[in-house]
Image: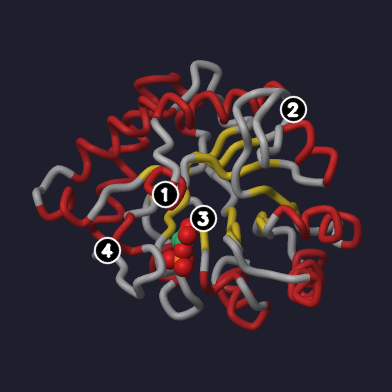
Amino acid sequence: MRRKKYIIGNWKMNGLAQDLQQIGEINTFCGRNDSVDSAICPPVTLISGAAQVNTDITIGAQDVHHNEAGAHTGCLSAAMLKEAGARFSIVGHSERRADQGETDALVAAKAKALKTAGMNAILCVGETLETRDAGNAIDFVTAQLLASLPEEASSKWLTVAYEPVWAIGTGRVPQSADIADMHAALRAALTDRIGSDGDNMRILYGGSVNGGNASEILTLDNVDGALVGGASLTADKFLPILEAVA
Ligand code: PEP
C-alpha cells in the first residue's frame, strides 16, 4: 500500500502575527512539491490569517471541543475552526491528555465531532517513559488507540500519530526498531478494527523529529509521516524535514 507521506507542524502555544511569514515560506515550498502532504497547526489566533493567504499548505487546529455549541467558556467547536480556515484538528495530544485530563472516550468524541463537521482528525497516542521502561509500551499504546478511535474511523478523514511522551520536546528519539515495532503493532490493530482500510490509514511518528533524523525515521516501515513540534516553528528548521521526503 502506497501512503503519501504527511508532515504536520504543531506550533503549540507559540506564534504571533509576525510569525505568519514562516508559514508563507513553507507554503511556497508546498506549491512547488506535491510529493508530500504538509500542514501547520498554528495557535487558533493565527488560523484565519494563515488560511487566507496560504493555499498550498493545509492549516489545522490543535484541539477542538466535542460539542457543537453551548455553555463551554473559552472552547471552540469544529464548525468554528472550520469557518476560520482549519481543515482538521489534532486530538488527544499527550500535553492535553496530561494537562487537561482528557480521556480516551473524550478524544474519540472530539474526533467524531470533526467528522460530523466535515473535517479531518489527527489522533495522538503514546506511552510514558515509565510504561516504556516497564516493557508495556506496545500493549499500552495499542489499547489507547483502540479506545480513542471513534466507531466511524476511516482513512478518508482520520490519521494516527504515535508520539512517545518521553520523546516530545526532549531531543530523545526511540531506537528505529522500536518505532517500526510500534507502527507495525498499530497497523495490525487498525486492520483488526476497521478491516482493509486500516492499511490505507496513515500512521505518523512524533517526538523530536528534526532535519537531521527525519530521513531515517521516515523510511521506516509503516511510518507515513511526522508530527513535528519544535522544529516546525521556523521555515529553516521545517523545510529540511519536508525535503527529506519530497
Ligand atoms: C509534538 O508536540 O507533537 C512534538 C512532536 O513535539 P517535538 O517535535 O518538539 O518533540
Q: Position of residue 87 (x, y in %)?
A: 74, 42
Q: How far apart in space, not on screen, are marks 2 and 3 (Cα)?
A: 23 Å
For the residue marked with disc 4, what is the amino acid?
Pro
Q: Secondary structure at mark 1?
A: helix
The structure residue drawn at horizontal position 20% and vertical position 45%, both measured from the top left corner, is 137
Q: Is residue 180 visible?
A: yes
The label shown at residue 225 is: 3
Q: How far apart in space, not on screen, are marks 1 and 4 (Cα)?
A: 24 Å
Neighbours of disc 1 within 10 Å: few (<14), some (14-19), many (20+): few
In the drawing, does residue 181 fall left or right of residue 130? right
The earlier-in-sequence mark between 2 and 1 is 1
For the residue marked with disc 3, what is the amino acid?
Gly
The earlier-in-sequence mark between 4 and 2 is 2
The earlier-in-sequence mark between 2 and 3 is 2
Q: Is residue 38 visible?
A: no
> Residue lying furthest bottom in this view?
236
- Give the residue pinned by disc 4: 174
* Mark 3 in CB contact with mark 1 (< 8 angstroms): no
* Mark 1 in CB contact with mark 4 (< 8 angstroms): no
Judge: label 3 CB < 8 Å from ligand 1: no
